[in-house]
């Protein structure tokens, strides 16, 4: 039997419950509930409104979600639009089918079209480097909270404009809902 291909689209207000279910499934019951609550808070946080929220569906089933929230640079050497990619969630039974890759690719296109210059993520270097993400600390971008040295490579940045890296730096300021040192341990 041929398995349906996932479709990617902008998230809708009516998708909240399905997004929460995908996040819980992706991260497991304990951590998933906490991350799901964070997603809910981030989508309404006036300190850093979402710059992109995309879902992947197969038929009527939601199978993935990615959220990008507005960020800014403190002590920036020049003005840039920035966002933080967090979290990326794919239902466990759908992992390994390029759904996460499609969500990130489409999300990067969406935020680029919205005028975002830099995208930050705290995630697996082996996955995110495929999209052009590079270690942010080494490029002059401090995370909202210090990243332990053994995980420094997980704090990454992707420049959506090629002339930025090496010309801009600063400390990333995130949404109030994400401003907790516990979220910055990889």
Image (cartoon, helix red, strand yellow):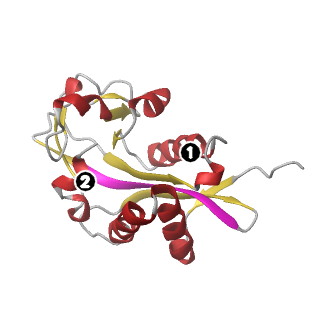
- 25 relative to 8 in the view: left or right: left
Q: Can residue 167 be seen by looking at this rendering?
A: no
**Residue 114 at what x, y percent from top left?**
44, 50
Q: Nearer the viewer, residue 25 or 162?
A: 25
Residue at which label 1 appears: 100
Position above or below: 77 against 110: above
Give the mark nearest the N terminus, 2 or 1: 1
Magenta residues, as a range? Answer: 61-71
Quadrant in which the C terminus is drawn = top left
- Residue pushed farthest left? 75
Gap in Å between the C-alphas at discs 2 and 1?
21 Å
Q: Nearer the viewer, residue 47 or 57?
A: 57
Q: Nearer the viewer, residue 79 or 140?
A: 140
Badge 2 crowding class, 10 Å Cα cut-off, few under 14, some 14 to 19, many 20 or more, is some
Position above or below: 171 against 140: below
Q: Can residue 116 be seen by looking at this rendering?
A: yes
Q: Kindly indicate the quadrant of the structure image that contains residue 149.
A: top left
**Residue 74 at what x, y percent from top left?**
12, 45
Q: Residue at 42% of width from left, 63% of height from top?
A: 32
- 180 relative to 116 in the view: left or right: left
């Amino acid at each position: 039997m041929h398995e349906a291909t996932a479709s990617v689209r902008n998230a809708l207000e009516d998708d909240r419950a399905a997004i929460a279910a995908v996040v819980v499934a992706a991260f497991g019951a304990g951590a998933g509930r906490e991350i799901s609550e964070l997603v809910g808070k981030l989508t309404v946080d006036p300190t850093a409104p979402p710059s992109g929220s995309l879902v992947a569906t197969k038929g009527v089933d939601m199978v993935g979600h990615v959220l990008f929230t507005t960020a800014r640079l403190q002590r920036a050497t020049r003005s840039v639009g920035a966002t933080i990619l967090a979290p990326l969630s794919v239902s466990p039974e759908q992992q390994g089918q390029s759904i996460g890759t499609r969500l990130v690719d489409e999300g990067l296109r969406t935020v680029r079209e919205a005028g975002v210059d830099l995208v930050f993520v705290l995630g697996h270097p082996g996955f995110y480097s495929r999209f052009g993400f590079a270690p942010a600390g080494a490029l002059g971008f401090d995370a909202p909270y210090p990243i332990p040295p053994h995980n420094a490579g997980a704090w990454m940045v992707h420049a959506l404009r090629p002339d930025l890296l090496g010309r801009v730096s600063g400390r990333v300021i995130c949404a109030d809902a994400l401003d907790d040192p516990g979220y910055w341990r990889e």
